[in-house]
Image (spheres, helix red, strand yellow):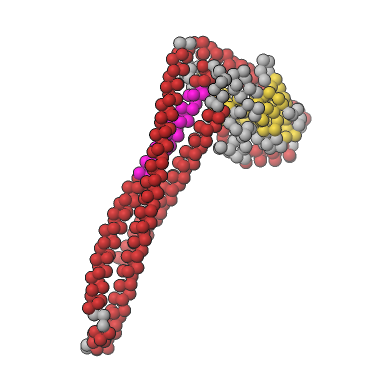
Amino acid sequence: MLNKSKTRILGLLLLIATTFSFAQNSKKEKLEERRQELRREIQQINSLLFSDKKKQKSELSAIEDLNYKVSVRKNLIKVTNQQANLLTREINTNQNTISNLRDELKQLKEDYAVMVVKSYKSKSEQSRVMFLLSSTNFQQAYKRLQYIKQYAKYQKQQGEEIRGKTLKLQEVNTELLIQKKDKDKLIAENKLAKKKLQNELKQHESLMKSIRKNLSRYGSQIKTKQREANRIDKQIEKLIRDAMASSNKKAGKSSSSNTFALTPKGKVISENFSLNKGKLPWPVTKGVIKLRYGTQPHPVVKTAIIQSNGIRIATSKGAKVKAVFEGEVLGVYRAKNAPPYVIIRHGNFLTVYKNLKKVFVKDGDKITTGQEIAEVYTNNIGETILNFSVFKESKTQNPEYWIARK
């Protein structure tokens, strides 16, 4: 019963150790994946927002871009610190393991040495024969023979255990050296990242000094832009409601319905669009999200509130816009004093692509996933921003939940 209890306890401990090790490895992989994502994002930010230093940005645009870059840089430093701390814990664990293994190995070698000496003293065949012949009866002789065999087996096991622990010690030592090397690399990277962050924060503070002098003017500019965005958003919402009413009228249903009347093909497209949540391709090949979905304070002028029905993606000049899913062009529209935009219907889902220069499609065109539909507009200060939205019926969705992570 005692042996069974010990076996169960050892099994449980092994299971806990294995689960913990798996969880640690999983956490390490996720942190490394996130670190690489942030590094790529900073490369994209530098490429798309800071490559052309000759272009004179407005102070507000420059501080927005820098604010975004600083935010990503801080996240990178935070994740790298988490990785370094995790490695520190693993290094400490392995150092303790090495210390314990060395103690165990020392004891095993000492025990083995004593055993070898005893074995040497009684190793002659004559001694073993005499040991057996001196038995008082057959049963004792049998037991003595079994003892000799068991002793030889135990001696062999001890030798194997010493070899096993020696190999384990070498393995843990190798792992420890790799961990220390990885940690040193992370620390060096973080030092460089912190140095860059300090320079960026100095630039940020310098720009903010100038902006603070004209906060009311910049706040007014942001509000004007927001009013223009709201005007276009209301136009889009009306177009979607009109399209729903038209689809229901054709199907002989009430035109006041808040849903699209779907054909069998439309239902299939809707279902497939829904199944691809989080997997849809980006509408541009290269891009970083400058403004996220929802109501939020302006990143610089905190008193100004921004309402975004989609996301704003900064991309390269001349970038082509690609449809994120198959569907049909609901329409190509142009709001007053604003670049054109395209709405594509995917059953009861819709995607909207705003701030376009050239449009390559027309009303009613059948579109395939990844098809180029337009080129993004570049303004007079060199900003190339695509506004991208996703709707289910007339309700806005967060596009970041639908497109794949880069």
Say if residue 26 shows up in the picture: yes
Eyeballing the image, is 218 above or below 251? above
Image position, residue 375 (x, y; %): 68, 27
Magenta stretch contains residue 86? yes
Instruction: Please identify the quadrant where the C terminus is shown.
Output: top right
Residue 301 falls left or right of residue 322: left
Image position, residue 335 (x, y; %): 68, 18
Instruction: Please identify the quadrant where the N terminus is shown.
Output: bottom left
Magenta stretch contains residue 120? no
Image position, residue 104 (x, y; %): 28, 60
Q: Which residues are magenta?
A: 64-88
Q: Main secondary structure of the magenta part?
A: helix
Q: Quadrant of residue 133?
A: bottom left
Image position, residue 151 (x, y; %): 29, 76
Say if residue 353 shows up in the picture: no
Q: Residue at image x 36%, y 57%?
A: 170
Q: Residue at image x 26%, y 80%?
A: 123
Eyeballing the image, is 96 above or below 83? below
Q: Residue at image x 39%, y 38%?
A: 187
- For this orientation, the residue located farthest to the front is 54
Q: Quadrant of residue 202?
A: top left
Query: Between 255 and 352, which is closer to the camera in this rendering?
Result: 352
Query: Between 86 and 346, which is closer to the camera in this rendering?
Result: 86
Query: Between 288 and 325, which is closer to the camera in this rendering?
Result: 288
Query: Between 298 and 58, which is closer to the camera in this rendering?
Result: 58
Number of numbered labels in the structure image:
0
Q: Residue at image x 60%, y 39%?
A: 279
Residue 404 falls left or right of residue 211: right
Q: Quadrant of residue 154?
A: bottom left
